[in-house]
Image (spheres, helix red, strand yellow):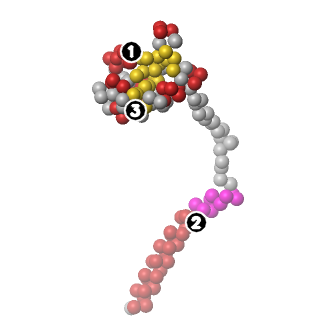
Amino acid sequence: MAAGGKAVYSFQEVSKHNDRKDCWLIIGGKVYDVSPFMEEHPGGDEVLLACTGKDATADFNDIGHTATAKELMAQYVIGEVDASTRPPKPAYRVLSEDARTKPDAASGGAWLTMLQLAVPVALLGLAFAAQNFAKTSTE
């Protein structure tokens, strides 16, 4: 039991509660059973269901809920999530300017661009020449 007599749930246990009749969310390290609130939620139950199985703190904060909405949350708290059971966040790597791949002469980057421009121009020139040749041969 956590402080205040609330239960501590694993991330996996909370993730199992992911349907309209049994919906739990993790927001700010607390576990909320929002099942009774599904039909009343102004954004619809789909919004709440989309936040199951993950930490929905960022989703909740990004929406910009009113103070009244935040006050309502207290009645749905059923415990806390065990932080040690959360899946690791994906690691992102920022590449330096030198580490990014750059086209070199061997890759043909410049030649490819030239061909992409030259081929349509050449085709237009051939079409124009053929049209003019056809006009002069019929005269």
Side (left or right) of 114 relative to 55: right
Q: Which residue is drawn at 55% across and 20% down?
A: 82
Mark 2 residue type: Leu
Which percent across, then down, holds residue 106?
70, 59
Residue 87 drawn at (x, y percent): 57, 29
Q: Is residue 60 left or right of residue 114?
A: left
Inspect the magenta stretch and tell me whether residue 45 lies in it.
no
* Distance in Å between CA atoms under marks 1 and 3: 21 Å
SS category of the residue bearing label 1: helix
Q: Check disc 3 and report the residue beneath it.
A: 19
Could you say which quadrant of the image residue 100 lies in? Answer: top right
- Give the labeled residue for mark 2: 115
Magenta segment boundaries in residue numbering: 105-113
Circle 3 packing at 10 Å, graded few (<14), some (14-19), many (20+), is some
Is residue 57 visible from the viewing direction of this image?
no
Mark closer to the chain start, 3 or 2: 3
